[in-house]
Amino acid sequence: MNKSELQKKAVEVRKGILTGVYHAKSGHPGGSLSAADIYTYLYFEEMNIDPSHPEDPDRDRFVLSKGHTAPGYYSALALRGFFPTEDLKTLRHTGSYLQGHPDRKHIPGVDMSSGSLGQGFSAAAGMALAAKMQGREYRTYCLCGDGELQEGQIWEAAMFAGHRRLDNLCLIVDNNNLQIDGTVEEICSPYPIDEKFKAFNFYVITINGNDFDEIRKAFDEARQHKGQPAAIIASTVKGKGISFMENKVGWHGKAPNDEEYRLAMEELGEEAAKLC
């Protein structure tokens, strides 16, 4: 896809996020919106996947370590054809397979159940090692949050992946600088993130995570680099795409009301019209 096509898809991913959280009356829109461009690029350009064969042993794997941003993940999966987009309206409803965190057993396209922060990256490292041991060519991608870097298990997994030189593993850090209680600097600073991953023998790329030109270049570079796992530190805007949500910590885990939903969808509709 070219840049314009990816931007249009990202608008649709953002619409799906808002639709799911609005109908659930709960959920996490802020971090889902900040990572929407990453989800879009992974599922429509980067990963070797086939919605008609979600269990293909040679498919690329994806682990959402920051599992609370499932609305963004589900929206990308639905638009890619893993399940009907209409089902996004059932997010978090009793009896729905689309619950608040990804469920490997019930959601087509989900490679790992996640939600306990810090644990997803360990699973991703295990998947990457399994590919090496089995002689398979698939790559494993993992998305974590910057607040999630405060979890010690992240660094255990980083030490393991760097030591094993898992160059088929790509970690993306959604660095929107906001977590539930404030800025990551105020709560427990992980900075400098790039230098920390370099110290764990990662090949580090720092980008604007809401710019598709930079996203494309980073994933191409990560795929071509050999001998080290990659860490893409993606600087993003919390609530990206909805003016009244951008860089507002209060939208970390809050659903829009009727009027806010209407305004948000209007903004996204206007953005889509510009791209056409």
Image (cartoon, rainbow, N blue to C red):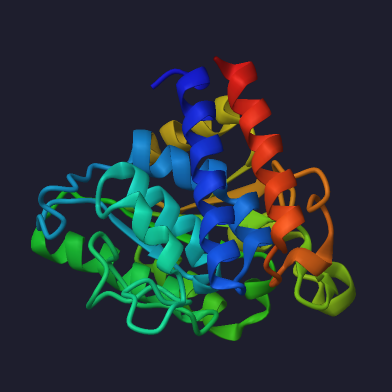
Q: Is residue 210 above or below residue 89?
A: above
Quarter assignment of residue 166:
bottom left
Q: Which quadrant: the N terminus? A: top left
- The residue drawn where x is 23% and y is 42% is 48
Residue at 51% from the left image edge and 20% from the top image edge? 3
Residue 249, located in which quarter of the rendered image?
bottom right
Relative to 194, say whether 94 is above or below: below
Q: Nearer the viewer, residue 191 or 72?
A: 72
Report the number of numbered marks: 0
Residue drawn at x 84%, y 78% as measured from the top left: 187
Residue 58 x, y percent position in the rendering: 12, 52
Camera-side residue of 144 and 218: 144
Q: Residue at x 25, y 59 (%)?
A: 109
In this picture, residue 137 sits left or right of residue 194: left
182 horizontally vs 6: left or right: right
Q: Vertically, is 218 above or below 140?
A: above
Image coordinates for residue 212, horizontal then vertical, percent = 56, 29
Nearer the observer, 53 or 125: 53
Residue 271 lies, in percent from the top left, at 65, 27
